[in-house]
Image (spheres, rainbow, N blue to C red):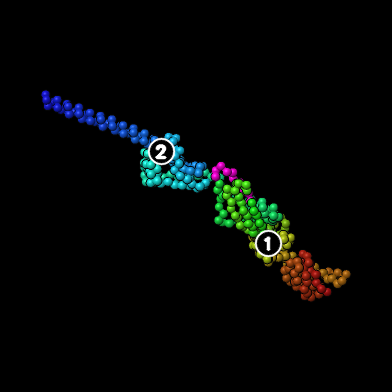
Amino acid sequence: MLKNALIYADFGFRVLVLLTCLTFGLLFLFAGARVALASTLRPVSVINDNVLRVGDIFEGLSEDKANIVLGPGPQPGKEMVLNATTLIRISSALDLSWQPQTTADQITIRREATVIGRDIVQSLIEEKLFENGLNDEYHLTLPTSLGDIILPADMPAQAEVTRFNFNPEKDTFEAVIAAPSASNPLREISVNGSIERMIDIPVLKDGLKNGNIIGSADIDYIKILQKDVQRDYIIDSQEMIGMTPRRMAAAGKPIRDLELENPQIIARGAAITLIYKDGPLTLSARGKSMQNGARGDLIRVVNMASNRSLEGLVTAENEVVVSP
């Protein structure tokens, strides 16, 4: 009997111990859950203030703790990264009971900003160039180092030119730009740049070969920098009309003088009309061409009546003017 009583007592004690462990285990589990819920790290934080507060980093805090200022925030448009070590120090100092899950835990804090890009700066400078009498087509060159103008988020995305100087001889300019305005210059930058004038150049719409006569419908225009215009480029479309390529002329590219020629209007061996002019007297005779010829060419011909070899100037299709 005594032995059985001891066995039952030991069994009861073990059950009691097990229940106690389970109870405390559940208490620790719920307590851990409350701690986890008490402060949670934000995945990313966007602020629009000059200072960084605890609530910008952790959520689930009381208002008093959330409003504690830790220090200056990042500049407008910039970012700040706090790693796990820094976050543990903040958590410990404020008794937030937060621990990182891994050493890679971190938070990126970004400051909201108003961004004034290069396109706005370029528009402001183009307006000033127009006011200074620049009406030609041009390409504007800004410094590669010119970045965006960053203002606080509550500022408008605008700027004004407060000083401008244009040198038309060198095609250079100097400008001072204030943002958001001349009366409220939170940011002020200096911009030095230049312009490259452009002109229209006639080109062929489609590729043409020798024998194709160029008409006005075959001509298009492209804009190129004036400094890139070669001395032998054809810049007057009238000089192209009625001409033919010496070989193959590509579409959309500037045409050089030597790439075109007058079309051949007399073929070698063709029957032609010889024109003799002597003052007011004009005579004609049948002849034969000994060469191909374009308008304005001097070619060899034969008078079929006298079988005499002559030289004459091609003036029209199958027509040559010779001296008597």
Image position, residue 219 (x, y; %): 70, 57
Looking at the image, which residue is at 38% across and 38% down? 96
- Label 2 and label 1: CA atoms lie apart by 64 Å
Looking at the image, which residue is at 55% across and 56% down? 145
Judging depth in this view, the residue of 29 and 254 nearest the camera is 29
* Residue on which disc 1 sits: 169
Looking at the image, which residue is at 74% across and 67% down? 294
Quadrant of the frame with the C terminus: bottom right
| Residue stretch rendered in magenta on the structure | 152-161
Seen in the image, is 259 located left or right of residue 105? right
- Above/below status of 66 relative to 307: above
* Residue on which disc 2 sits: 40
SS state under label 1:
loop
Magenta span contains residue 158: yes
Among the two numbered marks 2 and 1 on one chain, the one whose residue lies closer to the N terminus: 2
Which image quadrant is residue 69 in? Answer: top left
Q: Residues within 10 Å of mark 2 (few under 14, many from 20)?
A: some
In the rendered image, is residue 20 in sight?
yes
- Above/below status of 303 relative to 156: below
Magenta span contains residue 146: no
SS state under label 2:
strand
